[in-house]
Image (cartoon, coloured by chain):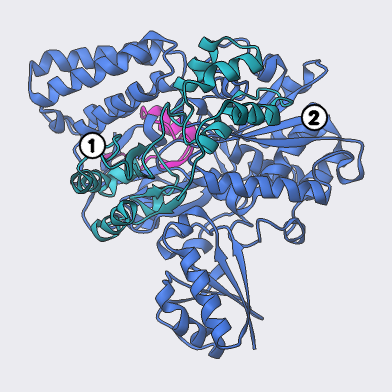
Amino acid sequence: MSLRLFIPRDAGAVAVGADEVAAALLAAATKRNIDIEIIRTGSRGLYWLEPMVELSRPEGRIAFGPATAADAESLLDAMLANAGHSLRLGPAEGISWLKRQTRLTFARCGVIDPRSFEDYRAHGGTKGLERALSLGPQDTVERVFQSGLRGRGGAGFPTGIKWRTVAQTQAPRKHIVCNADEGDSGTFADRMIMEGDPFLLIEGMTIAGFATGASKGYIYIRSEYPHAITAMEAAIAAARRGGMLGNKIAGSDFAFDIEVRAGAGAYVCGEETSLLESIEGKRGIVRAKPPLPAHHGLFGRPTVINNVLSFAAVPLIVERGSAFYRDFGIGKSRGTMPIQLAGNVKYGGLFETAFGVTLGELVDDIGGGTFTGRPVRAVQVGGPLGAYFPRALFDTPFDYEAFAARDGLIGHGGIVVFDDSVNMAKQARFAMEFCAIESCGKCTPCRIGSTRGVEVLDRIIAGTDRAQNLSVLEDLCNTMKFGSLCALGGFTPYPVMSALTHFPEDFGAAPRRLQAAE
Amino acid sequence: MPTFEPWSAERTAQIISEYRGSEGPLLPILHAIAHAFGCVPEDAVPVVAHALNLSRAEVYGVVTFYHDFKPAPRGRRVLKLCRAEACQAAGGDALTARAEATLGVSIGETTPDRRVTLEPVYCLGLCATAPSAMLDDRVVGRLDETRLDALVAEAQR
């Protein structure tokens, strides 16, 4: 009798005991003289079920979870006898939370062995790159442009325009830079891809290199993601061995290589120009634009800089065509968005779906409300610079423009759920405090404004001259919003003002409740 | 538990030579120095500056900009607690207060016996299994009082 198991090596699964579960299963099987093979995958993103163990069966993979090391013996019994178990979830693909999703970018995440290039190929990998090589650079850029793909890092700028600009800029050397400085709280999709399907990112960047005439790529990964750094470095080495990086890629004359660079704990380096400065070995100070990175980017050379998820969406777009991708979504938000449900949420994890799903569906239905069982009071969408939304705005569809119309942003797709014990004045203060800690210091509204913001909020919370200080706060937010050089200072007013607008009672002001049908 | 070697100019020069050929080598060099010595000591700054043909001010400016590069070694174990929104929503603030009380230090400080440094971290990307922590290189999620107490006790050992 032999067993073939899949257990995630994803940091989120490891943090709740996946390594211990794998070790216990191995030890228990060895003791019983059972032949066992354990393949460490990424996570499927159903984090409340992690550590999730999947058993390979002729009819497909059978999932069990959330497992602990103490369950090893009984899990083995159930697996060997193909019998019931209290942790048995049935066929992994049949779990309704997974089945409801439209997994384009995350199709392979949690399925394949992220260290095996052969496994990537066996699951449909490299087809996008092969298609690009046969289409030629210009048509590849056109496919990305026509797909309507917008930058998934948060700004939502059309990816095809960036690529076209770099392709049209003449220079002896150009660069592809991947922004993997995923610092927003409540987001982990980049980490999951890098740990679960790293070849997809490599393929996306290689296509970008081919399409724009660049020969060298950098992936800037935050140092808080050691598992992702290890996974990416292993995958890059495997991709070189497999001929997806290096000279003569996939038998063509195209040469491209990628290097991983680790960040050093500065949130502002998620801002693209600050990230470029950081790779160059400087303080992560934001650059004024123009010149655009597409003209004058890394080391002064034309540079495509995109988020992990933007690059990861590209291979499928190139392989299947623009229309295939563009047909998902609504309005100007095309394709799918990997949405991340986090914080105090019952069913937290990665939910990839076409744009258009409402916030309420995501939080109440898919997320199942809070794990504390208390009512949801607020959700912060789009990271530390995103707005807090009250229940009254839960009809907002997940779409760049719809969120902007309600003074919010979807950012990198993270949703942090808070129950009714949250104090929104405290959250507003934290937003200013975080901006003060992380400000690069280049522009005054951000550098000084954030510190003044903390002080003003402290006075409001203490009840000192509340009305005057509230108007000072509004004025200050206005200055930061319009006077800051980048999104750190410019967007910090979103969480602050949304907290004040939607939850004035927490600031000691008279409530002015929004109506749902506003 | 990580172990570090005492700072030496020779070892620093050796690290620099490993990265010198790459473009923009300063951050990789500083990471390697921090990895070897547990910090980026002030003595390393002129050595790096000289080798890369930068001013000491430029290197010092970079070292002090990034949270990862500490001027002096931290405690024997480093316990990072996530202080960002997702972990706040999941009860992280109360757990930080509990860790501070148990260790007798505020977040950002090292215990007087130099055993544990308690540090804030702004997001480990484990936001669906919050609250989260990291002890040296090990990530821990779904923290509650019991799991936190065990983690703090392990760090103190």
**Callout 2–callout 1 Cβ contact below 8 Å:** no
Residue A391 counted in the magenta span: no
Dividing the picture into quarters, in which one does residue A221 lie?
Answer: top right
Residue A365, placed above or below residue A477: below
Number of residues whose C-alpha sits closer than 10 Å to that of mark 1, classed few (under 14), some (14–19) or many (20 or more): some
Residue assigned mark 2: A215
**Chain under numbered label 1:** B
Q: Kindly indicate which chain is depicted in blue in the rendered structure.
A: A
Where does residue B16 sit, x and y in percent of width and height? 65, 27
SS of the residue under disc 2? loop
Quarter where residue A144 is shown: top right
**Chain B takes which shade in the image?**
cyan
Residue A180's place in the image compared with B55, above or below, is below
Where does the image place residue A122, in percent across and percent down from the top left?
76, 61
Q: Quadrant of the N terminus of chain A?
A: bottom right
* Residue A397 magenta: yes
Q: Left or right? Give the position of A309 relative to A406.
A: right
Magenta stretch mostly in which secondary structure?
loop
- The amino acid at mark 1 is Ser
Foreground residue, A317 or B76? Answer: B76
Residue wearing tag 1: B106
> Can I make out residue A328 in this image?
no
One can see residue A111 in this view? yes
| Chain name for mark 2 | A
Q: Report whether mark 2 lies on the same chain as mark 1.
A: no
In the displayed structure image, the side of residue B96 where residue A269 appears, left or right: right
Q: Identify the residue at image location x=28%, y=35%.
A: B109
Sort mark 2 into few (<14), some (14-19) or many (20+) by Cα contacts within 10 Å: many
The residue sitting at 50% across, 37% down in the picture is A182
Locate residue A242, reporting x and y percent: 82, 51
**Eye-nearest disc, 2 or 1:** 1
* Distance in Å between CA atoms under marks 2 and 1: 48 Å
